[in-house]
Amino acid sequence: MGSRALERTAPQTRSNPLTLLVALVITFGVTVYPQALAAADGSADHGAAMLMFWAMSAGYVSGVGYRPVYWPFRLLFSATACVLAVALAGWRLGIPQG
């Protein structure tokens, strides 16, 4: 391992209790009531599930205060991404399928 790899460290951050709470609510909500991510006909809505699980992941990562080193991962796992993914999942679940 070169010295350059050792120099690359993530900036210090603080935890974000709101996004951690969002991640916990998604985790427990989907565990207790998985039908929340189903379409009107009862089939699985994979797009909404993907968005909710992205929000859950981003919520855990940003909620515990971890900040990825590389910027693409910072964007994908930020508090803003968590909120955006929840909003998109809610919008998707509100669209009538048919």
Image (spheres, rainbow, N blue to C red):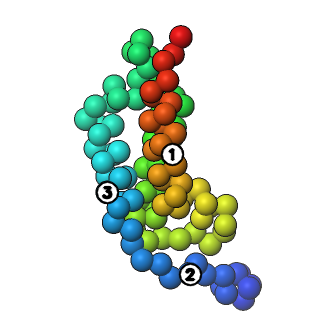
Q: Position of residue 74 (x, y in %)?
A: 60, 64
**Image quadrant containing the N terminus:** bottom right
Q: CA distance from mark 2 to mark 1?
A: 24 Å
Give, as a three-letter code, the residue at label 1.
Answer: Ala
Q: Earlier in the sequence, mark 3 or mark 2?
A: 2
Q: Which mark is residue 85?
A: 1
Residue that appears at 61% across and 60% down = 75
Give, as a three-letter code, the residue at label 3.
Answer: Leu
Q: Position of residue 58 (x, y in %)?
A: 48, 56
Q: Position of residue 5 (x, y in %)?
A: 70, 81
Secondary structure under tag 3 reads: helix
Q: Is residue 33 above or below residue 82?
A: above
Secondary structure under tag 1 reads: helix
Q: Which mark is residue 21?
A: 3
Q: Earlier in the sequence, mark 2 or mark 1?
A: 2
In the rendered view, does 68 fall on the left or right side of 66? right
State which quadrant residue 20 falls in: bottom left
Q: Is residue 57 above or below residue 46?
A: below
Q: Which mark is residue 4?
A: none
85, 26: nearer the viewer: 85
Residue that appears at 43% across and 71% down = 65
How many numbered marks does the figure carry? 3
Give, as a three-letter code, the residue at label 2.
Answer: Pro
Between marks 2 and 1 in the image, the one whose residue lies nearer the viewer: 1
Q: CA distance from mark 3 to mark 1?
A: 15 Å
How packed is label 1: few (under 14 Cα within 10 Å), some, or many (20 or more)?
Answer: many
Disc 2 designates what residue?
Answer: 11
Q: Position of residue 59 (x, y in %)?
A: 43, 57
Q: Is residue 4 above or below residue 82?
A: below
Secondary structure under tag 2 reads: loop
